[in-house]
Image: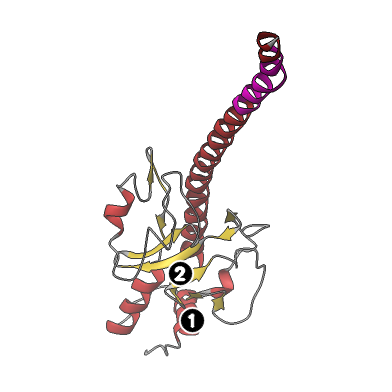
Amino acid sequence: MQNRISKQTIKRYIVPAGIGLLLILLLGLAVVRLMRSTKVISDELIADQVVKLATIFKQIDQDCKIIDFEHERNYIDFLTVKAFVGSEVGAMNLAYPQHWKGNYLDDNPTIQEKLYEIVKTKDGYFIVPGQGVTLSNGKVIGKDILITPETAMGPLLNDPQALLYKESVLAAPVSMGGSTFQMVVQEVPLRVSKEDDVQELSHAQGITRVC
């Protein structure tokens, strides 16, 4: 009788409990794998979007000459702008704002619901994922990976525990020909052969041509 009850107990309670625990374990492993896969996909997306953004800013610099940015950390939330007044669009200051060819994007790019940023570093301005973004290596931008005006970007871009994912970097420098251009204009006499270039420069920099 006891043996029969024991077998019934096993069939009724222990076996279902064991199956339940096994299912919970498998579900947990699936969730962990999914989270890991999501982070990897995020890194791949960051690498692609950073390249795309760097290409856009290179084009803007070629057309408008980027002089500088207003803050040490600047949100990239202005590439959807079609037209603006003055020399600033968002936090970006341009030498030739009349050459703006926006909008450059239909939507502001985000990752993990956070805007990308342009941050000031020891090596110039860089496009980076926004603060709070978690990378596949488990590091969080703004918490584990701190980027300040004193930060050298080289070590971060070569470190898998920072901004290197496989063979792709998760940040990119911003082309800023306007900053050099402005320094040259302010420090040395300007020699320009084309009349329209002189007029353009005078308008952008407030320079009066000396004949």
What label does residue 65 carry, if any?
Answer: 2
What label does residue 111 carry, if any?
Answer: none
Q: Main secondary structure of the magenta part?
A: helix
- The magenta region covers 7-22
Quarter occupied by residue 173: bottom left
Color theme of the render: secondary structure
Residue 85: where, in percent of width, then height? 63, 81
Does 26 appear above or below 95? above
Instruction: Using residue 22 as the reference point, say whether residue 182 is left or right of it.
Output: left
Quarter occupied by residue 121: bottom left
Nearer to us in this view, 17 or 164: 17
Q: Residue at x 34, y 47 (%)?
A: 161
Residue 93 is a magenta residue: no
Q: CA distance from mark 1 to mark 2?
A: 10 Å
Residue 77: where, in percent of width, then height? 59, 66
Quarter occupied by residue 136: top left
Residue 116: where, in percent of width, then height? 52, 60
Q: Are marks 1 and 2 in contact (CB under 8 Å)?
A: yes
Q: Residue at x 27, y 53 (%)?
A: 155
